């Protein structure tokens, strides 16, 4: 089995969006473009927030858009998008959002290895500063490296 | 001890919480006596646990009888914050 690696084509920097729904649509675009999800997945993410509330805003300024594994997920992966203008999701404690992560998984456990990399990346506050300040392709490369191999205490 | 992390679909935020809780318990050398699972909101009543972990939005929809055993997290990625909440709840419950 090949080692799952996060790729630069799934990072978008300083995008402009109208509101939280648009932020999820824009954030999901690389996954649609590279055929990881169908546009139906975006509708399901939006419906999930409308039904259950903005619980996908998992930390100050960070939304983790996702829905359940089903036919609208073609491959397992995630994308990261930073927003030029933060948008409100309606979160009591974590608005406004300026980092949108879209997660798609073909099953309940297909995404765990990738998600572990993401969790380790997000758990370091310095990494969030780097992500929020990022503007160039070089910055994207650095972020991708930090996600794929950046776990300082694990050395892999 | 069993800990259940709850999110809308059981595949996103709850999995992130599970990974961080397992890492915290491992750091505390308590991972051997604790099991962490994830469920979606609809399955919470059929997932007995000592401690539940969820968000404000979903806590509002929790059954009354498990609210005392529940940690409400604002931040699912800040391990220091999760650890502070977890240690307090385990202490309260005598775990």
Image (cartoon, coloured by chain):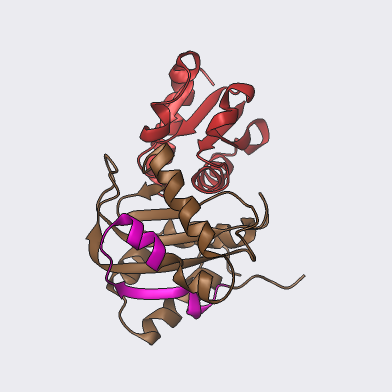
Chain colours: A brown, B red
| Quarter where residue A156 is shown | bottom right
Residue B88 percent coordinates (x, y): 41, 27
Kindly identify the residue that appears in the image at 46 percent across and 23 percent down.
B62
| Quarter where residue A24 is shown | bottom left
Q: Is residue B20 visible?
A: yes
Kindly identify the residue that appears in the image at 54 percent across and 36 percent down.
B5
**Does the magenta portion include A10?**
yes
Given residues B94 and A77, the one toward you in this image is: A77
As drawn, is A40 to the left or to the right of A49? Answer: right
Relative to A151, does residue A47 appear above or below in the rendering?
above
Residue A91 percent coordinates (x, y): 29, 43
**Does the magenta portion include A33?**
no
Relative to B59, does residue A150 appear above or below in the rendering?
below
The magenta segment: A6-26
Kindly identify the residue that appears in the image at 45 percent across and 32 percent down.
B86
Given residues A20 and A93, the one toward you in this image is: A20
């Amino acid at each position: 089995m090949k080692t799952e690696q996060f790729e630069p084509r799934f990072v978008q920097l300083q995008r402009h969006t109208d509101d939280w729904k648009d932020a999820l649509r824009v954030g999901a675009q690389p996954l649609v473009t590279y055929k990881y999800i169908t546009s139906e997945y975006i509708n399901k993410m939006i419906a999930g927030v409308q039904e259950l509330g903005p619980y996908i805003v998992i930390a100050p300024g960070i939304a983790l858009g996702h829905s359940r594994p089903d036919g609208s997920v073609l491959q397992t992966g995630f994308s990261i998008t930073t927003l030029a203008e933060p948008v409100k999701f309606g979160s009591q404690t974590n608005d406004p959002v300026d980092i949108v992560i879209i997660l798609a998984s073909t099953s309940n456990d297909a995404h765990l290895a990738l998600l572990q990399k993401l969790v380790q990346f997000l758990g370091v506050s310095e990494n969030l500063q780097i992500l929020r300040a990022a503007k160039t392709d070089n910055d994207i490369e650095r972020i991708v490296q930090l996600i794929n191999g950046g776990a300082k205490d694990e050395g892999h | 001890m069993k800990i259940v992390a709850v999110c809308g679909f059981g595949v996103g935020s709850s999995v992130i919480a599970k990974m961080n809780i397992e890492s915290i318990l491992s750091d505390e050398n308590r991972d051997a006596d604790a099991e962490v699972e994830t469920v979606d909101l609809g399955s919470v009543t059929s997932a007995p646990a000592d401690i539940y972990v969820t968000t404000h939005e979903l806590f509002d929809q929790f059954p009354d009888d498990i609210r005392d055993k529940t940690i409400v997290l604002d931040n699912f990625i800040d391990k220091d914050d999760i650890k502070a909440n977890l240690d307090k709840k385990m202490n309260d419950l005598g775990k």
